[in-house]
Image (tube, rainbow, N blue to C red):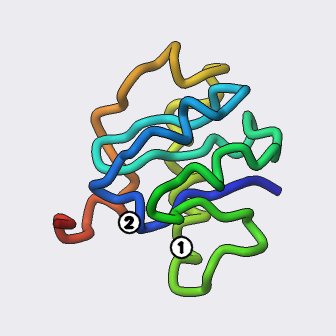
Amino acid sequence: MTYVIAQPCVDVLDKGCIDECPVDCIYEGERMLYIHPDECVDCGACEPVCPVEAIYYEDDLPDQWSEFYKANVDFFDDLGSPGGASKVGKIESDHPIVAKLPQQA
């Protein structure tokens, strides 16, 4: 099990969750942040600091955003597990689910 970042994060990228994450498992894409499922230790520190309530425990992810579980997992298919977002920096792409969304205000 892991935490998942959902649609409310798209085009917001607050990054407060990154500062709270003790294991550096929240990566920045072009339009959204992603939690690495293999690096997340399920501590939950990220969830309460999200100003748009975009972070959910996997089992609590609302049905309307269920595809974001796949987006958070598949985002790392090519990247693998680098062992920390700070080593990688911003990734200039997004999962196709996110990339196809209209620009958020």
Image quadrant of residue 89? top left
Give the class, few, some or many, for how many residues have Cα within 10 Å of label 2's Cα (few <14, many ≥20): few
Instruction: Say which residue appears at 73% left-offset and 63% top-offset.
Output: 57
Q: Residue under circle 1? A: 67
Give the class, few, some or many, for how many residues have Cα within 10 Å of label 1's Cα (few <14, many ≥20): some
Measured as percent of width and height from the top left, residue 36 is found at 63, 41
Q: Of the residues under marks 2 and 1, which one precedes in the sequence?
A: 1
Q: Residue furthest bottom?
A: 63
In the image, is residue 74 above or below residue 25? below
Instruction: Say which residue appears at 38% left-offset and 66% top-offset.
Output: 97
Q: CA distance from mark 2 to mark 1?
A: 8 Å
Q: Residue under circle 2? A: 97
- Are the residues tagged 2 and 1 within 8 Å (C-beta)? yes
SS type, badge 2: helix
78 lies left or right of 14: right
Q: Residue furthest top?
A: 87
The amino acid pointed to by label 1 is: Glu
In the image, is residue 11 above or below residue 91? below
Q: Nearer the viewer, residue 16 or 101?
A: 16
Measured as percent of width and height from the top left, residue 70 is found at 58, 63
In the rendered image, the quadrant that contains the N terminus is bottom right
